[in-house]
Image (tube, grey):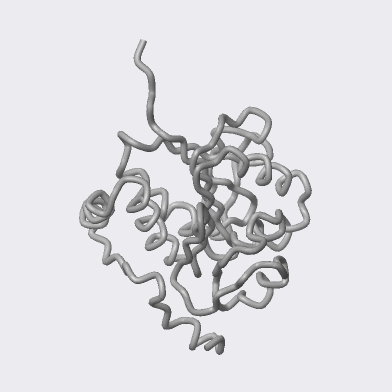
């Protein structure tokens, strides 16, 4: 019997999640199939509708989810409801205890913040929703001008497409910069390698 030595990357889904927040990074992580096994997780089994309409089947619910090595939390307008979902926040706290890396995209940072997982950490989020997200984590060191932030084992990305740049940063940390470059080239993606590159903070009046 062969042993699967791949790490498990779990993407949290909830009603009205942002499509690109989840599937942009998953496209890039999915180009490392020998290293990463990707699963989707939600509070309950079934099909989850994204904010844009397309629906996604869930692989696992909270009760039967295997241990996750890398957790991906997307944003989307559904985060406004989930920040008060005690079941989801408790699952995030539990998963974080054994995860190697925690990552969020866009307003997904609000869920990590509401769970207390960003306390004392530097983090960023979507610039158009910056003020609302930062209210969810008053003990977080929020950074307005950043494409993504890496602080210890936590990666947080700015809005939507920034999650793809962050994902490549995660791949670089886990598997090396050469692998991140290979993935970017295979996806024909122009990777913003500088995490401080951020023209959108100024447009949103944050810098």
User: What residue appears at the point 63 percent right and 49 percent down from the top-left corner?
Assistant: 14
Q: Give the side of residue 18 with respect to residue 198, left or right.
A: right
Q: Percent position (x, y) of residue 164?
A: 39, 60
User: What residue appears at the point 67 percent right and 61 percent down from the top-left corner?
Assistant: 119
Compared with residue 166, is residue 59 higher up or lower down, i.e. above or below? above
Q: Is any atom of residue 203 visible in this view?
A: yes
Toward the top, the furthest residue is: 1
Q: Give the side of residue 2 with respect to residue 136, left or right.
A: left
Count of numbered circles in the view: 0
User: In the rendered view of the protein, which quadrant contains the N terminus?
Assistant: top left
Compared with residue 194, is residue 21 higher up or lower down, i.e. above or below? above
Q: Is any atom of residue 78 visible in this view?
A: no
Q: Percent position (x, y) of residue 115?
A: 71, 54
Dividing the picture into quarters, in which one does residue 74 lie? bottom right
Compared with residue 173, is residue 40 higher up or lower down, i.e. above or below? above
Residue situated in front as seen by the camera: 51 or 3? 3
Q: Percent position (x, y) of residue 15?
A: 64, 52
Q: Percent position (x, y) of residue 26?
A: 41, 48
Q: Give the side of residue 117 with respect to residue 105, left or right.
A: right
Dividing the picture into quarters, in which one does residue 117 lie? bottom right
Compared with residue 97, is residue 173 higher up or lower down, i.e. above or below? below
Residue situated in front as seen by the camera: 6 or 64? 6
User: What residue appears at the point 58 percent right and 33 percent down from the top-left corner?
Assistant: 60
Residue situated in front as seen by the camera: 192 or 21? 192
């Amino acid at each position: 019997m062969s042993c699967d030595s791949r790490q498990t990357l779990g993407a949290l889904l909830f009603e009205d999640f942002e499509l690109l927040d989840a599937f942009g990074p998953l496209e890039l992580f999915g180009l490392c199939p020998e290293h990463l096994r990707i699963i989707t997780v939600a509070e309950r089994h079934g099909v989850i509708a994204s904010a844009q309409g397309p629906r996604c089947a869930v692989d696992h619910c909270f009760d039967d989810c295997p241990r996750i090595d890398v957790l991906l939390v997307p944003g989307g307008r559904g985060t406004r409801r989930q920040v008060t979902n005690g079941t989801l926040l408790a699952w995030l706290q539990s998963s974080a205890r054994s995860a190697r890396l925690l990552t969020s995209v866009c307003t997904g940072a609000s869920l990590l913040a509401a769970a207390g997982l960003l306390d004392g950490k530097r983090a960023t989020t979507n610039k158009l929703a910056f003020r609302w997200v930062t209210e969810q984590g008053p003990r977080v060191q929020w950074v307005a001008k950043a494409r993504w932030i890496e602080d210890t084992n936590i990666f947080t990305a700015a809005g939507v497409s920034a999650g793809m740049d962050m994902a490549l940063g995660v791949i670089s940390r886990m598997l090396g910069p050469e692998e991140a470059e290979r993935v970017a080239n295979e996806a024909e993606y122009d990777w913003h390698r500088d995490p401080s590159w951020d023209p959108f903070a100024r447009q949103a009046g944050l810098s």
